Amino acid sequence: MRIDLIPDLPSEPVDAEKKVIVSSPVKREIKATCPESALTGESRYQALLQSVYDAALVTDMKGATVDVNVRAQEKLLYERDELLSLSVMDIISGADASLLETLCQNLENDRYTLIQASCLRGDGTLFPAEISVNKVNLGEMHLCFFIRDITIRVQREEMLRTTYNAIQNSGDGIAVTNQQTTFEYINPALATMWGYDDPAELINKDVHVLCDKREDIDVVLDQIREGQPNIVEAILVKKKDGTIFSVQVSVASNLNSDGEQVGMIFSFVDISDRKRAEEAERQAEQRRVMLESLGAACHHLGQPATVLLGNLGIIQKKLGDEESPLLELIQSSIEAMESMSNILYKLNTVNEYKTTQYLEKPAGEDSEESRILEI
């Protein structure tokens, strides 16, 4: 159980003999001091030793254990008599006489020495520990070892280290901003994506420096500020050299331990290649549809063109060889229909959609040039 207390400083000094009220859901009265007659010296020592949260071992200057608290029994999984028969070197893994010598030398000048080590439990298991060592005069000099199990802390540090390494080596661009959308962290992938040599170039800059248009990212930011847990959008952004490219941005709130928003986490994925592939696929589909449409048009126009050409031939034979304007018109119509037949044949055999310039664009005009299918 953990209790977080926010200090409420008294306006007047607290009398040592007065009771101090601690403000909490369960109100209790705690005396600031106890009358001197309440405890003897030995009982005060034991009361203090047993009240220590850490596992406490008192040893002589050679490391032999002379006293322990209940917490040490619980944490180290030994009975009291077993602990009193051990040396601190049996409990601290890797410790030897040189450690005690170093401790004694350090404690001549310092109030305490802090050790990061692993401790051995009675069942043979190890746990990471932070050990504070100091000298205490109990008639003669002794060493006092306060052992704190830091297993959870080490696990969290390892998880943080793993997470940091994963983010640093991610192929996606990842950034963390404060509430004012100012960058506090940039991973290498994001810097590379935008053409920066060093992520530090973007630290303390606003997220809008990455965007082509401010309003594109503002739409996302507004939704996050309104309480949306995660937003994914495709937007256009601008590199350091001005090049425009497409990214998919994911934005989520960065919350503190109380669930309050303290910033935002951005993840950027370059989707330029995907956009180009989608455009190429769209154009390929457009060409396929055009070619199929040409085939259908040729099929539907071919039959009436054949009928017209046949009928014109019959009329030409009926008129014979006599010279008349009508015969000339029929002959020119037959030639036109034959030309149309050739065009329909070429269109029907087209297997690649290509265009060519049809009319030149007049000088000074902004209109697009006229283009037709190349056959």
Image (cartoon, rainbow, N blue to C red):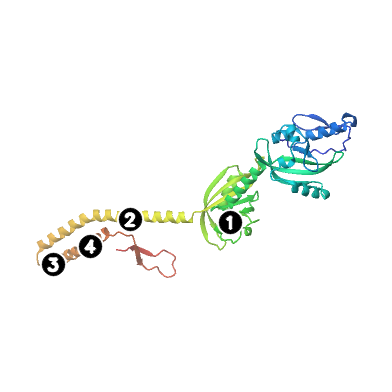
For the residue carrying disc 2, how many other residues have a C-alpha within 10 Å: few (<14), some (14-19), or many (20+)?
some
- Amino acid at the residue labelled 2: Met
Q: Nearer the viewer, mark 4 or mark 1?
A: 1
- Tag 3 residue: 324
Instruction: Tell me the tag on residue 188.
Output: 1
Task: Tell me whether circle 4 and circle 3 mark residues in contact (CB < 8 Å).
Answer: no
For the residue carrying disc 4, how many other residues have a C-alpha within 10 Å: few (<14), some (14-19), or many (20+)?
few
Q: Nearer the viewer, mark 3 or mark 2?
A: 2
Left or right relative to 27: residue 322: left
Task: Tell me whether circle 3 and circle 2 mark residues in contact (CB < 8 Å).
Answer: no
Which is more toward the observer, 295 or 111?
111
Q: CA distance from mark 3 to mark 1?
A: 86 Å
For marks 4 and 1 on the same chain, the one whose residue lies earlier in the sequence: 1
Instruction: Tell me the tag on residue 342.
Output: 4
Q: CA distance from mark 2 to mark 1?
A: 45 Å
- Amino acid at the residue labelled 1: Pro
